[in-house]
Amino acid sequence: MSEPSKMNGNYNSVAGTVKETIGNATGSTEWQKAGKEQHAKGEAEIKAAEAKGYAEGTKDQVSGKVDNVVGSITGNKSKEMEGKAREESGKAQKEINS
């Protein structure tokens, strides 16, 4: 199975809604069912991609914080700054995927 993708999830969500709408308009239960299933699959993939992004953001935020603190304690300004940047990047990624 491939990695979850917001873009692919959005595509399937919209395509499923279109199929379901066509099924409703034509009275085709097959199209209605297929559309609902594809829409649900798309929504699930969006949620999975968001969860993956949130987890990656948390990992970056924590490891960045550790490097920031270690750099501060040891006087390694480069490590401290890199850690702070990764911490902020992780925080932003979590917010995007919340």
Image (cartoon, rainbow, N blue to C red):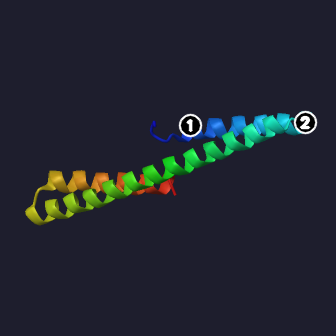
Residue at the (19%, 57%) spot, across then down: 80
Type of amino acid at the residue the image marks with label 2: Ala
Residue at the (73%, 44%) spot, across then down: 36
Q: Which secondary structure, mark 1?
A: helix
Callout in the foreground (2, 1): 2
Number of other residues with Cα within 10 Å of mark 2, as a class: few under 14, some 14 to 19, many 20 or more? few
Residue tagged by mark 1?
7
Residue at the (35%, 55%) spot, across then down: 88
- Label 2 close to label 1 by CB (< 8 Å): no
Residue at the (91%, 37%) spot, across then down: 27
The earlier-in-sequence mark between 2 and 1 is 1
Estimate the x, y position of residue 79 in percent, counting from the top left: 17, 53
Number of on-image labels: 2
Estimate the x, y position of residue 93 in percent, counting from the top left: 43, 51
**Quadrant in the rendering for residue 39:** top right
Circle number at residue 24:
none
Using the numbered discs, state the Cα–Cα distance from disc 2 to disc 1 in whole angstroms: 27 Å
Residue 13 falls left or right of residue 80: right
Estimate the x, y position of residue 75 in percent, counting from the top left: 10, 61
Type of amino acid at the residue the image marks with label 1: Met
Number of other residues with Cα within 10 Å of mark 1, as a class: few under 14, some 14 to 19, many 20 or more? few
Residue 56 falls left or right of residue 40: left
**Quadrant in the rendering for residue 57:** bottom left
Q: Which secondary structure, mark 2?
A: helix
Circle number at residue 25:
2
Between residue 29 and residue 97, name the one nearer to us.
29
Residue 78 falls left or right of residue 96: left
